Image (tube, grey):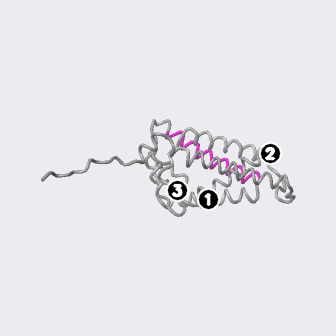
Amino acid sequence: MWDLAAGPFLAAAGLLVVAGVPKIVDPLPLVRALRAAGMPAGRLLVRAFAVAEVGVGGWALTAPGRLSAALVAAAYLVFTAFVARVHGRGGVLGSCGCFGKPDTPATRSHLALTAVAALTALAVAVDAPVGVWSDVDTAGLTTAGLAVVIGFLAWQVMAVLPTTSPVAIRSSVAPTRPSSTTKD
């Protein structure tokens, strides 16, 4: 299973690190997103979650195994449940808060990617690799490169693509007011 899931799993673990660091620095976008979804949240709780997110992602990258994969799966199941809750309530958040920016809305693509990441991590947890980094060869380097590409593309789908939709573009352009000129 590891041969098939290594690239996507490592990408998912890497995204935990990439998404967690901005939340440690500035937890407010996620605090606002959670509150908008009707969930109580504070800076301390969000920062603690972000530290755990970075820790789990880093651990899964350096020592992929049953427990680290299960924790990656749990993180993505939580993300999937949150995005599903937002969509189930019929609301669209201005931001999911996942990348620490206030302009990343939670979309159906986001929901699908987090669900696939959770399933991939579950598959790795069930059939975990043994000594994955002990024998780094060209296949290992190819897998690492694939993980970087998949992670980058997933980030593009979740953080950049939603900002290119017509609705996002319209909402980012401030309405202009006619200038008030007086005639003498």
Query: Which label sits on residue 100?
Result: 3
Give whichever of discs 3 and 1 has the lower sequence position: 1
Badge 1 element: helix
Q: CA distance from mark 2 to mark 1?
A: 24 Å
Give whichever of discs 2 and 1 has the lower sequence position: 1
Badge 3 element: loop
Badge 2 element: loop
Q: Principal SS element in the magenta part?
A: helix
Query: Which label sits on residue 171?
Result: none
Q: Nearer the viewer, residue 151 or 168?
A: 168
Amino acid type shown at disc 1: Ala
Q: Is residue 111 above or below residue 15?
A: above
Q: CA distance from mark 3 to mark 1?
A: 15 Å
Q: Is residue 63 above or below residue 33?
A: below
Give whichever of discs 3 and 2 has the lower sequence position: 3
Q: Which residue is mark 1?
A: 52
Q: Nearer the viewer, residue 91 or 183?
A: 183
Which is in the foreground here, disc 3 or disc 1?
3
Q: Is residue 84 magenta?
A: yes
Q: Which residue is mark 2?
A: 127
Question: Which quadrant holds the N terminus?
Answer: top right
Q: Residues within 10 Å of mark 1 (few under 14, many from 20)?
A: some
In the rendered structure, which segment of residues is drawn in magenta? 65-86
Provide residue 177's location: percent of width, then percent of height: 28, 48
Amino acid type shown at disc 3: Gly
Q: Residues within 10 Å of mark 2 (few under 14, many from 20)?
A: some
- Measuring 85% from the left and 60% from the top, which residue is drawn there? 134
Residue pushed farthest bottom?
25
Which is in the foreground here, disc 3 or disc 2?
3
Provide residue 168's location: percent of width, then percent of height: 46, 43
Q: Is residue 51 above or below residue 105?
A: below
